[in-house]
Image: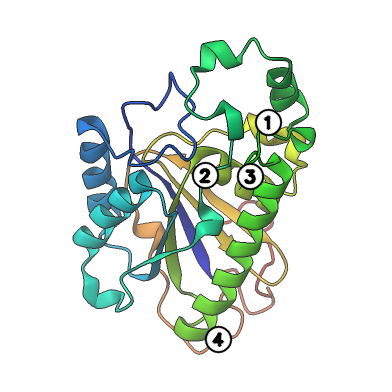
C-alpha cells in the first residue's frame, strides 16, 4: 500500500493575484520559506522512501526544506526532479492577473468544464493532458517505490495546486470536471494510499497536526497490509468506518 504525500509549494510573491505557471526564476517569498520550513518539520517523523519535485524553483525550494528536516540518510538519491509533476502550462495566460483572466471566455470553461479547457498559445496545455501526465507519473513512482522499498513505503511529491487537485480527482474516481471542488492550499499535505483495489484519500489539504498516522506500519510479513482482520484483503475498506 504505497502512500503518496502531495505537498504544494509555499507562497511566492505572485501566488494568488497572478497566474504564475512556468514563470522562470520564481522562488518562495519570506512567507513561503516559513511555510516550507514548517511543513518540513511536520513531515520529519515520516520516513520518506523518495522525495520528488516539480522542476520549478518554488517546488524545489519547498522540497529542499523537507529534505533538510528529514535528513538525507533516508533518501540516498536526494531530491529527484520529474517534469511530469510540473505546473500546468497555461500558455498565454502565464503571468497575467487572475482578475483580468476572469473576464476571458475561457475562464468559464476552466470553472465549469475544465476537461475541455486548453490554454492558448504555442505552449498552452489542456487540463486533461496535465492530469494524464501527472497521474501517469504517480503510477510509475508507485511501482518504483514499492519495488525498491516495499509495499508500505511512503514518498513525497512537491508540486502545484492544479496538479494536486487533478491527482486527487483521479484517486476519488471523479471526472476532471469536478476537480474545482477540491482545494490545495500552499504548503498543504494531501495523502493518498494506493492499493491494488483502490486508492484511499487519507488526508486532503492538511495544514497542521500530527503525522503519526502517515508513518508506515512495521513489516509483519502479512500480505494484506490491513489492520481490519485476516479476512480483509489489501484495498478493502473498513465496514463501519474503522477504528
Mark toward the viewer: 4 or 1: 1
Helix, strand or loop for disc 4: loop
Question: In this view of the protein, which residue sits in the foreground, 212 or 181?
Answer: 181
Helix, strand or loop for disc 2: loop
Residue labelled with disc 2: 87
Residue 189 visible in the picture: yes
Mark toward the viewer: 2 or 3: 2
- Residue 10, quarter of picture: top left
Residue labelled with disc 3: 166
Mark toward the viewer: 3 or 1: 1
Residue labelled with disc 1: 120
Q: Is residue 22 left or right of residue 79?
A: right
Residue shown at 34% from the left, 58% from the top = 212
Asked if marks 4 and 2 touch (Cβ < 8 Å), the reply is no
Q: Is residue 181 left or right of residue 243?
A: right
Helix, strand or loop for disc 1: loop
Residue shown at 32% from the left, 64% from the top = 46
x then y, percent, for residue 211: 35, 54
Residue labelled with disc 4: 222
- Mark 4 / mark 2, whichever is N-terminal: 2
Question: In this view of the protein, which residue sits in the foreground, 24 or 171?
Answer: 24
For residue 50, the mark is none
Asked if marks 3 and 4 touch (Cβ < 8 Å), the reply is no
Question: In this view of the protein, which residue sits in the foreground, 208 or 38?
Answer: 38
Whole-number angstrom distance, CA of label 4 to CA of label 1 = 51 Å
Residue shown at 44% from the left, 68% from the top = 154
Whether residue 24 is situated above or below residue 156 in the rendered picture: above
- Mark 4 / mark 1, whichever is N-terminal: 1
- Mark 3 / mark 1, whichever is N-terminal: 1
- Mark 2 / mark 3, whichever is N-terminal: 2
Amino acid at each position: 500500500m504505497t502512500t503518496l504525500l502531495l505537498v504544494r509549494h509555499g507562497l511566492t510573491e505572485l501566488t494568488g493575484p497572478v497566474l504564475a505557471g512556468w514563470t522562470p526564476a520564481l522562488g518562495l517569498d519570506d512567507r513561503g520559506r516559513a511555510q516550507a520550513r514548517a511543513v518540513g518539520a511536520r513531515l520529519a517523523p515520516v520516513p520518506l522512501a523518495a522525495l520528488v519535485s516539480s522542476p520549478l524553483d518554488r517546488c524545489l525550494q519547498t522540497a529542499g526544506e523537507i529534505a533538510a528536516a528529514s535528513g538525507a540518510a533516508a533518501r540516498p538519491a536526494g531530491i529527484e526532479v520529474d517534469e511530469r509533476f510540473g505546473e500546468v502550462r497555461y500558455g498565454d495566460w502565464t503571468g497575467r492577473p487572475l482578475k483580468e483572466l476572469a473576464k476571458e471566455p475561457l475562464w468559464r470553461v476552466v470553472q465549469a468544464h475544465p476537461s475541455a479547457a486548453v490554454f492558448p498559445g504555442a505552449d498552452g496545455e489542456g487540463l486533461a493532458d496535465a492530469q494524464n501526465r501527472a497521474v501517469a507519473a504517480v503510477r510509475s513512482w508507485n511501482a518504483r517505490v514499492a519495488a525498491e522499498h516495499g509495499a508500505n513505503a511512503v514518498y513525497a511529491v512537491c508540486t502545484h495546486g492544479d496538479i494536486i487537485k487533478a491527482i486527487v480527482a483521479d484517486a476519488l474516481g471523479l471526472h476532471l470536471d469536478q476537480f474545482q471542488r477540491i482545494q490545495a492550499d500552499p504548503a498543504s499535505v494531501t495523502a493518498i494510499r494506493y492499493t491494488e483495489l483502490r486508492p484511499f484519500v487519507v488526508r486532503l489539504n492538511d495544514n497542521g497536526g500530527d503525522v503519526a498516522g502517515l508513518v508506515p506500519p512495521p513489516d509483519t510479513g502479512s500480505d494484506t497490509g490491513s489492520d481490519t482482520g485476516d479476512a480483509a484483503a489489501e484495498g478493502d475498506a473498513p465496514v463501519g468506518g474503522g477504528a
